[in-house]
Amino acid sequence: RERIFNGMRDAVAKQRLAALADAFRSLPTNEKNLEQSFEQTFTEAMEILGGESQIRGIPAADIRRTWEIWRRMRVEQAVESFKFWLLQSGQLAGLADTPGTCAFDRLCARIQDNPHYQSLGAVPQKRRAIMELCLNETTARRLPVRPGAQPPPTSLARCEE
């Protein structure tokens, strides 16, 4: 009997944890959610789920782990969306053509009000890495490299976000 009870309890806990994961996934996709604390996001998920009674019996560590997985997934979605938008938007055009100025700084100034840029405000190091990658890709496409030669170094390391 105890084994049956424990099995049923575990099955219910898994169902409730899956419902919590679904509640996190149903939250709107915006920069606000990436900047919110666990507690803030959890509160919003509980409103969707119908209250904390729906997750009774789930260990706090499992709840936190579910949120962490959801947040990593949302950050990766925002990173991919930002990269796709940046490469397709035309914002990179002409940035490397002005000598003596920092292409990265000019790019930041161009796109700082864009929702794609702002969506990664909670992870500025990832945003910067994507911007540098896209700038380098664009520069590499424009500048032909002779066989055996190293591409020219970029000046992005000097720029500050």
Image (cartoon, helix red, strand yellow):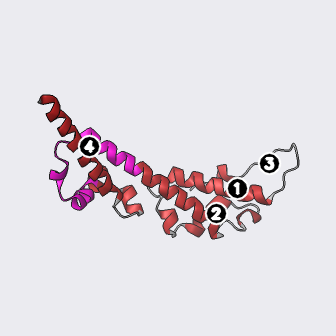
Q: Residues within 10 Å of mark 1 (few under 14, many from 20)?
A: few
- In the image, residue 143 sits, relative to residue 16, either above or below, namely below
Q: Please state which amino acid type lies under the numbered disc 1.
A: Glu
Label 3: which residue? 151
**Residue at the spot x=29%, y=49% of the render?**
18
Gap in angstroms between the C-alphas marked 4 and 3: 52 Å
Q: Which residues are magenta?
A: 42-71
Side (left or right) of 114 relative to 39: right
Q: Residue furthest left?
A: 1
Foreground label between 3 and 1 = 1
Residue under circle 2?
A: 87
The Cα atoms of the two marked residues, 4 and 1, are separated by: 44 Å
Q: CA distance from mark 3 to mark 2?
A: 20 Å
Cα separation between marks 1 and 2: 9 Å
Q: Callout 3: few (<14), some (14-19), or many (20+) C-alpha neighbours within 10 Å?
A: few
Q: Does any portion of residue 123 appear in the rendered image?
A: no
Q: Nearer the viewer, mark 4 or mark 1?
A: 4
Q: Which residue is mark 1?
A: 137
| Mark 1 touches mark 2? (CB < 8 Å) | yes
Looking at the image, tell me whether mark 2 or mark 4 is earlier in sequence order. 4
- Rendering quarter of residue 140: bottom right
